[in-house]
Amino acid sequence: MKRPLALFIVVLLLLAACAPAAVPTSAPAAQPTAASRAVTKEAIVTQEAAIAPTTAPAEAPAAAEPTTVDTRPTQPSAQALPPTIRPLATARPELKPPVSGGVLNPPTLIPTLPGNSSVTSGQPPPAPVWSSYRDRVSGLTFQYPRDWPISFSRRNKSTVESILITRANQPITNSVTILIDVRKKQGDLLAWLGRQLPTGLLLIDAQALEGTNSYKSYNARIGDQQAVFIYAPAHGKIVDVAALHTSDKQYFYQVTYLGSTPDNLDDRAAFLHLLNTLTLTGTTSSGVTLPTSAFTDGLDAAKWK
């Protein structure tokens, strides 16, 4: 038993004597200098920006330590890393709203073809000279100057409705006015007119009429309807006054022109245009036919027809 033990001890001693020297471990890598760290971080940031997808970037870790990157240009160092990957050529530039607050892309102007009323300049098309009106009470329709204010008075003592159209921006004491009175039909128009006109209730001086008997017979037409046109030239403190009387199955209509001093031919043309576009209840035709009168002297028919 002693011999095997002795041999075992000898073997252990031999193994201890023949054991190879410990293999030296590799030296730890040298820590980068401060300049080297700055360049490395800048290169990493640049590379991450280059390969980042064009979609929204991933959220940064909440516990990330804030870092400050020096954006000033620096001279390349001998120890600098190789150049990083450039940003992708397909990266879209950042869109910023214009300082003026307008749209990012200006609207494309579409050329206007002949006969096309489209407007590409951004300005509204010119407004029409005339506005159209349809009365909800009597069904009367007509056109009047677009910039003349219009007002109404209904269910007066002697009228069903009164429509007042006045030229804008005129002194109240010398303002051109067109007054339309609608009354319930009361028998024959000529007979009614013969009774009412001499009383002075119809806004016109019967004693100053051009043609003393002008109101005693039909001398005008509105469409297919017979009418009476009367005119009293300005005299004393009374301005030019003209009136047209007509009727349909339900109403008497009186359309009166009260002029200014001196009177204006354009205002008279506006009155005549209203008469020329007048359509009565239950009728489809319009167009005025007037007797020869000083009221229309000097007027170009093209201005009101």
Image (cartoon, rainbow, N blue to C red):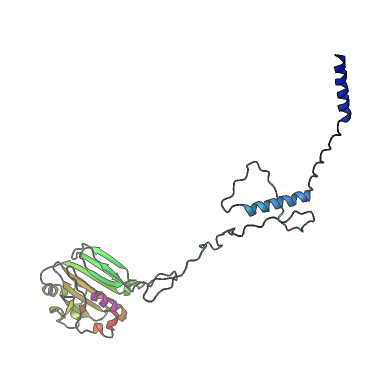
Q: Residue at x 80, y 41 (%)?
A: 28
What range of the chain is rendered magenta? 269-276
Instruction: Work out whether 84 lies above or below 113.
Output: above
Could you tell me which quadrant the N terminus lies in? top right
* Among the 4 quarters of the image, the one containing residue 198: bottom left
Q: Residue at x 68, y 51 (%)?
A: 45
Q: Is 188 on the left or on the right of 98, as rendered?
A: left
Front residue of 260/74: it is 74
* Magenta span dominant secondary structure: helix
Q: Magenta segment: does it hold 273?
A: yes
Residue 228 coordinates in the image, percent (x, y)? 17, 77
Residue 122 coordinates in the image, percent (x, y)? 44, 69
Residue 59 coordinates in the image, percent (x, y)? 60, 46
Instruction: Work out whether 127 lies above or below 7.
Output: below
Q: Magenta segment: does it hold 27?
A: no
Front residue of 179/261: it is 179
* Among the 4 quarters of the image, the one containing residue 63: top right
Instruction: Work out whether 197 lies above or below 94.
Output: below
Could you tell me which quadrant the C terminus lies in? bottom left
